[in-house]
Amino acid sequence: MIGLVIGAILLLILIAGALFLNFNPAFGGKATEAQIQRYKESGLYIDGKFKNQILTSLDMNIGELASTITEFIKGGSDRQPTGKIPVKKLDSLNIVNYSGKDARLTWFGHSTFLLEINSMDILIDPMFGPSPAPHKWLGPKRYYNELPIEIENLPEIDVVLLSHDHYDHLDYNSILKLKDKVGKFYVPLGVGPHLKEWGVDESKINELSWGDEIDHESLRLICVPARHFSGRGIFDRNTTLWGSWIIQGSSKIYFSGDSGYGPHFKKIGEQYGPFDFAMLECGQYNKRWETIHMMPEQTAQAAVDLNAAVMMPIHWGAFTLALHSWTDPVERVTAKAEELGVNVATPVIGESIVLNGGVLPKKRWWVENK
């Protein structure tokens, strides 16, 4: 009898899991045969998967996997703030009425930004949700409950840029709230079907491959390589492309998305640089997965490779997705940047930066909230 009960419970769990995997809309959509043919023509899509420019292994042996899981379960008191971290509020009228000739950038934590440039409002990797997971109960919680501004209070958005389809960069519920107030979405190949599945009008979606350039009014947007991977479910790894972005307007800006270190940074710097400002991934790293996430010292070197006048570390300050302390990224990257002569901006979440001559925020605000 007990065996039957246990068997029934396990069966129910399996059924619930299968239903979740098959019917949860957060997993997104799938490409059509016509779209897949276009992906093949890009030269990046081989045997049903997108590939990095250089060998990038994601595999861990059984021992490494077991120790990683153990460390995650064990946790650490320094992996998230012990106090309330500062968040500056952003007023919608402040956005609407901004008339400065210089670009202005506001960080929402992790990799989400509002960029005001050439009289346009651009959201980059707009992850406004409480947890980077297919359901808020399944992932780590955001360090702060109140965002600088809620989606509902944002004005009309001209452009959304997406770097790839991982949950900490592409958030289902954020897109649902944003889709009717956004003019255009610019995304790497394969990410478009997710947006279409979630109700974004197909005419608003533009998919780009590495090296593709597109003009949006007075802006030029360029999709360039990154060294990473993609996927939202169990069986769809690397079926969509990942990338970094160059935004050319009154300032020339680089956004790394997620990327391991590689020769692509120097190539991008030589072909498109110098850059006025570079937002560079610096967080959620580990030696075991160094090929897909840079170590902080590599982030500082990437800024040199790109020939960036100012670098800002991103991909930290919001979620715990790795084993290091939550302040380790910013402490290590600022130390290495000083050694290399790299100018670093470290704004509080919600603090705006005016580019090209504005005063750069450099306060070590995280020290007070360890």
Image: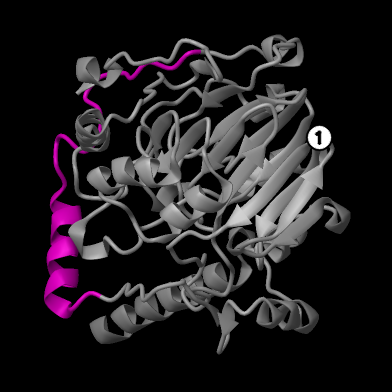
Of 281 and 92, nearer the camera is 281
At which x and y percent is residue 154?
70, 24
Few, some or many residues within 10 Å of mark 1 (<14, 14–19, 20+): few
Viewport quadrant of the N terminus: bottom left
Q: Residue furthest front?
A: 270
**Residue designated by label 1:** 218
Q: How many marks?
A: 1
Residue 81 is a magenta residue: yes
Magenta stretch in the rendered image: 60-88
Q: Give the quarter of the image for residue 118.
A: top right
Q: Residue furthest bottom?
A: 47
At which x and y percent is residue 44?
58, 76
Residue drawn at x 68%, y 34% is 122
Of 70 and 352, nearer the camera is 352
Q: How is the image coloured?
A: one colour
Viewport quadrant of the C terminus: top left
Question: Height in image: 62 above or below 27?
Answer: below
Of 162 and 85, nearer the camera is 162
Question: Height in image: 24 above or below 329?
Answer: below
Residue drawn at x 67%, y 55% is 187
Question: Height in image: 62 above or below 317?
Answer: below
The answer to whether residue 283 shows anywhere in this view is no
At which x and y percent is residue 45?
59, 80
In what element is the residue under mark 1?
A: loop
Amino acid type indicated by mark 1: Ser
At which x and y percent is residue 238?
51, 73
Residue drawn at x 40%, y 73% is 54
As drawn, is 56 to the left or to the right of 191?
left
Q: Give the quarter of the image for residue 124.
A: top right
Question: Height in image: 34 above or below 23?
Answer: below
Residue 9 is a magenta residue: no
